[in-house]
Each structure stands twice: as C-alpha cells, then as structure tokens.
Image (cartoon, rainbow, N blue to C red):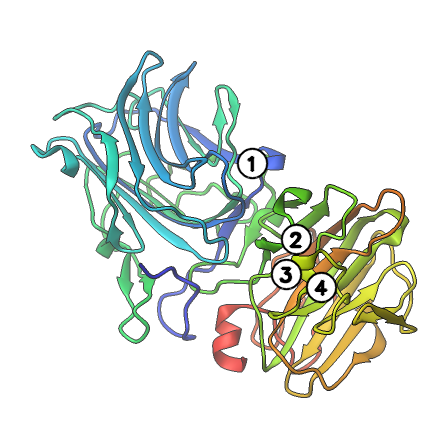
Amino acid sequence: MPLILGANSVSGYTIKNSLRFNSGSSDYLSRTLSTNGNKRTFTLSCWLKRSSLSAEQRILMAYTGGGAQEWLPQISSANKIKLSGDTGLGYNFDLDSDALFRDVSAWYHIVVAVDTTQATSSNRIILYVNGTQQTLTGSYPSQNFDFVYMNTSGSTLLIGGRTSPSGLYLNGYLSEMFFIDGQALTPSSFGQTDTDTGIWIPKAYTGTYGTNGFYLQFKNSASLGTDSSGNGNTFTVNNLTSVDQSTDTPTNNFCTLNPLDTEVSTTVAFAEGNLQITPSASSSCPTRSTIAVDKGKWYWEVKVVASTEQQAMIGIADVTSSAVNSGSIIGGDAKSYGYYAGTGEKYNNNSGAAYGATYTNGDIISVLLNMDSGTLVFYKNGTTQGTAYSSLSGIFSPAFSDGGGGSAPLVVLQTNFGNPPYSANSYTDGAGYGNFSYAVPSGYYSLNTKNLATYG
C-alpha cells in the first residue's frame, strides 16, 4: 500500500493548510451538536501525519459525559486504527485494523464509512487508508444500530483529544477533514491514484454534507475550527493558536525531525509536530530529519530554546553516518558536520576547529546546504559565519544533538523547515514556501516535496 510522501508535481489539486496538534499543550477542537443527524449512515475523511508512535491518540470522538463515548477513529498504542463505541458498561462495537501505521514522514488518508443498515456485518463500518480497504478484526455494530453519541443532539464532538477524563491528545497533523452526514462514501469521493506515480493523492470533494456535516480546511489562522461546508458547523479551538497552522500538507510534505532515526528514542522527547527536540538524559541523543538530499541548495533555521552549558550541536549527517546509531555528537564521525554552541567551533570526524561565534538561548541559526557545490554555511541571527565546510559529497539530512560533556546537558531546539512552532517573520523561499525569521538567500529552498521535485 503506497504511503503518500507529497505530490511529485507542482500542478493539480492543492491543499494549502493543516493543523499541528501537540499533546503536551492539550490541543483539541470541540463542538456540541444542536440537532440530530443520521445515526446510521455517515462518513469521515481526513489526512493524518503522525508525530509520535505507540501511544493511544484520538482523532474524532463523541460523548455526552462520563466514560460513555464513541471514537471513529483513534490510533491505538499498538499503532493500529481503532473504531469503538463504549457505553460505559460494554462495547456496542470494537474494531482494530490488522495493519500498523508507523510512518512519521508520510501522510495517511483515512476514510471511515458507516452504514449500519447493511445486512452483512463487515459492510456496516468500512475503513480505508490511502484508497485501500483495510481488514478489521473485532465486533461490528448490530444491523440498524443507532449511534448513541456520534450524530446526536447534545453530544460533543472532539477532534484531537479526550476530555472525560482528559488526555489521549493527538501528536501530529490533520488536514482536509470532512464529516458527511447521511452518506457512506468510498475514498474516490476525496482522492485518486496518480497515474504516473501510483501514489494516492487528494482531489476536491464535490458532494453534499448533510445536517451535521462539516469541512475543516484550517485555512483561517484566526479561527482554525471554521467549517467550510456552508453548514456553519464551526468548532471551538482549545489551546491551539495561529502558530499551529501549517503548510505541511498531503500535497506538499515538509521535512520534520525523525523519532525513528535517533540514538535511543526513549532518551529524546519530540514535540510540536516533530519540530522540537529535547534530550531527556545525559546523552548526546543525535537525531536526523525525514528528508535527505544529494543535490540542490537548501535552507532551514534552528531556534535555541534552552542549552544548559551551551551544549547544542546543529549540523548535517549523511545517511551512512555512524554518529546517530553510535550515540556520538553530530560531527563525531567522518560523515557528519556540526556547529557547536559553547565554543563556536565546527566539528567533523570528532575534531573541532575554530569557526564562528558562540550561540545561546534565543539565537536563531540558519543553515545553508549547497549540494551542487558541496558547501555548508551557518548564519547566526542573520549574520554569516562563513563557509564551514566545502567539497561535501553524499546524501545529507539536517541533524542535531546535544554537544556532550558537562554534568547535566539539556538542549531544547526548535527547527524551522518552513513551518516554525514559534512566531517568525514570514520570509519565504523563491518558490513562495516557508515562514522564516530571516531572508532566504537567492537560489536556496525549503525542504519540502514540491521543491524536491523541482530543484532536488
């Protein structure tokens, strides 16, 4: 089953925004229904990019209070998609996907089609991922079952979390979320297979919505829960801000940090849609990102939020670098290159050399990687520190680590590949992508799939 990595062309249907959910901030959207919809037939469609694995996380749920609730769907701690209805005394239905969904670099298209009037039990709830019907195991609802909460007046719909009791918040990105009241639709209403690549891609929905139907585009940063269906079924925003609006979407997938490509995942805390990294132990905790390049000219920024004893190391690592797996610092082997906060030195092959200014909390380091000429340049707060390395050859990813040493090293870095988890200054690259604090030098581009298709 193909997993979408973003559009490979610069034309066609474009999704402009997603919404970044961070469990540590208890982010969610909520709406209380004022009227009954169709309790037997409806469809949910959304695009999901995961940020953390092996934790129960809600996507859409409905409840009226207490422990009774329905969720269609959630991600289970086993990394399966789960569809359940809990009365508080037992389950009306309880289904799990056979497949696991563990790719933090890709967008998944999830469709849940419900029609409990069907005589065949397995047709009453159908799950599709990236256009392919999934095998479900467990118990289906009875024929003509009326959902107790999902489309019932007085129920509260929650996107991205649970409030009774609170928790199970989503870590990840949601985009193009539809709820179609009164119809059980197939994925072809929302997506199609790209004939050139075989990848499942979005397309415009042209149908109707029904009474409680909604369409969330997340395009209004001042009102992120705005319903674009025409029904006015807008959601209340809880703990999300305009900074959480993102242009990382199924049609243009941006680079993020990769929790699957770090020394020991349990020693590194990832947050803010995998744009923030915090080592949680006295270890270097080297980490690479989700996109690697071997040609083209690329730009990104890194904000130092905290750096006890100025231990931050910002740089790049080749896909063959042993630094990540061995737990070395970035720059600790021949195929990784770093810029060290505490001394301003550049590091490669575990050797430091004089380079630029030191940097500390609040500073923003810009990184310019030119794989056409093989050069690596760092800027501090908009001022170039000169060429750190030249004659580079390989396939490199942005990479980060604690600098190592000291009694209690602790680094918090926030990365900006075009969608910062902090307020920036709206500078874009030459293709119009990104939201950077400093002007992007001419000819350099942000790391996303549309730029890779054109310049990479």
- Work out whether 41 lies above or below 262: above
Query: Which residue appears at 74% of the width and 63% of the height?
Result: 330
Tag 1: amino acid: Asp
Q: Nearer the viewer, mark 2 or mark 4?
A: 2
Q: Quadrant of residue 73?
A: top left
Question: Which circle marks residue 301 in the picture?
Answer: 4
Name the quarter where the N terminus is drawn.
bottom left
Tag 4: residue type? Glu
* Image location (x, y in percent) of residue 163: 50, 23
Q: Distance between the residues labelled 3 and 1?
A: 26 Å
- Say if mark 2 contacts mark 4, CB within 8 Å: no
Q: Mark 2 points at which residue?
A: 263
For the residues bearing labels 1 and 4, Cβ distance under 8 angstroms: no
Could you say whether the residue bearing mark 1 is in a helix, strand or loop? loop
Q: Residue 288 carries which label?
A: 3
Of the residues shown, which amino acid type is indicated by label 3? Answer: Arg
Residue 89 lies, in percent from the top left, at 33, 11
Q: Can residue 169 be seen in this view?
A: yes
448 in relation to 138, above or below: below
Q: Is mark 3 on a helix, strand or loop?
A: strand
- Mark 2, residues whose alpha carbon is within 10 Å: few (<14), some, or many (≥20)? many
Q: Is residue 428 visible?
A: no
Q: In which quarter of the image is residue 42?
A: top left
- The kind of residue on which mark 2 rests is Glu
Q: Assess whether mark 2 and mark 1 are in contact (beta carbons under 8 angstroms).
A: no
* Residue labelled with disc 1: 27
245 vs 5, nearest the viewer: 5
Residue at x-position 74% and y-position 69%:
333
